[in-house]
Amino acid sequence: MNDTMWLTQREMGELFGTTASNVSMHLKNIFAEGELAESDSVIKFRISEFNKKPSNLYNLDAIIAVGYRVNSLKATRFRQWATATLKEYIVKGYVLNDDMLKNGAPFGKDYFDELIVRIRDIRASERRVYQKITDIFQECSFDYDKNSETARRFYATVQNKLHYAITGHTAAEIIAERSDAGKPSMGLTSWKGAPEGPIHSSDVTVAKNYLTYDEMETLNRLVAMFLDDAELRAKDQVLTSMEDCERALDQFLSYNRREVLLHKGERTKRQADEKALREFAEFRKIQDRTYENDFEKEIKRIQGSKG
């Protein structure tokens, strides 16, 4: 079993984004048409000591053949990569795998060991909670491409998904509903100079600044648990694509009894910001009358001590 890759039908389905039954159908056609010999492509192997029945494992030739037949986005990306690799071989007469030459076999134990180290670095970092999720997405997706539609969609929705999971509202809805010039601190629970410093216009358009202590605690706990889940996947050597990571976040939130955001919300970011800034214009009048900076406080202290 050395020098090749062996996968079950279910694992091939996960690899190419399809079902095990669809993989089975393609394999039957591949063998029936004589593209591959079944005797050379399949071995019986007992994967678990608890499962007495051996499973069929298929070699790399069979995996590639299936990849050229499956109709899915993952399979399309595989074919694009395979075609580019084949083209390089035809033109140059050889293909060099730079990563493999430098680091050994791709997606082997070293890959997952390094991934665990990166996840722990993310956990220990001072990055914001939202940034830690996007860091996980970037580091754990073996097919990461910042310019892909999947990456753009993930980055555009991840904050809203987390806000919605803990409040039932999108970031724009939180800003629009909680910004209120008549409330203490305009409804904010945190801002750049909190708690003594003045509130600025840049503070009132950040949804996280309106979250309560309990909501922030829940957010931090959810992110910590998601990091645990990502580390466990790496420890179990589960190869994760961008789509897998995106799906894993939704499944994680659902498993933890959180609502998963499936729409864009009732307010746009622009509408929310405009409302918050209108409230801030009124609140600033109050703040300008009542706020005392450190110099003013010191003058009052000196005058009080003289009295």
Image (cartoon, rainbow, N blue to C red):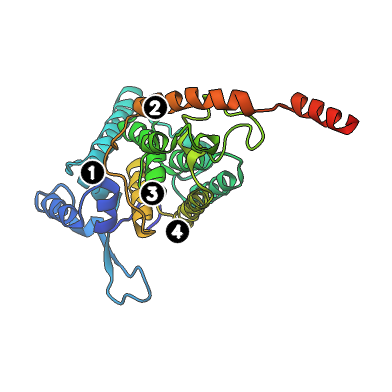
Q: Quadrant of residue 237?
A: bottom left
Mark seen at residue 275: 2
- Lower position in the chain sequence, tag 3 or tag 4: 3
Q: Quadrant of the N terminus?
A: bottom left
Please name the amino acid that badge 3 sits on: Ala
For discs 2 and 1, the disc positioned in front in the rendered view: 2
Residue located 9% across and 49% down the image: 33
Residue 93 seen from this side: no
Percent across and percent down for residue 67 are 23, 43
Percent across and percent down for residue 183 are 50, 37
- Lower position in the chain sequence, tag 3 or tag 2: 3
In three-dimensional space, the C-alpha distance between marks 3 and 2, rounded to whole angstroms, equals 23 Å
Residue contact between numbered discs 3 and 1, judged by CB atoms under 8 Å: no
Percent across and percent down for residue 50 are 36, 76
- Lower position in the chain sequence, tag 2 or tag 1: 1
Answer left or right for 198 relative to 147: right
Residue contact between numbered discs 2 and 1, judged by CB atoms under 8 Å: no
Residue located 11% across and 51% down the image: 29
Answer left or right for 234 relative to 45: right
Answer left or right for 255 relative to 185: left
Q: Quadrant of residue 196?
A: top right
For discs 3 and 2, the disc positioned in front in the rendered view: 2
Q: Which residue is mark 4?
A: 236
Mark seen at residue 67: 1
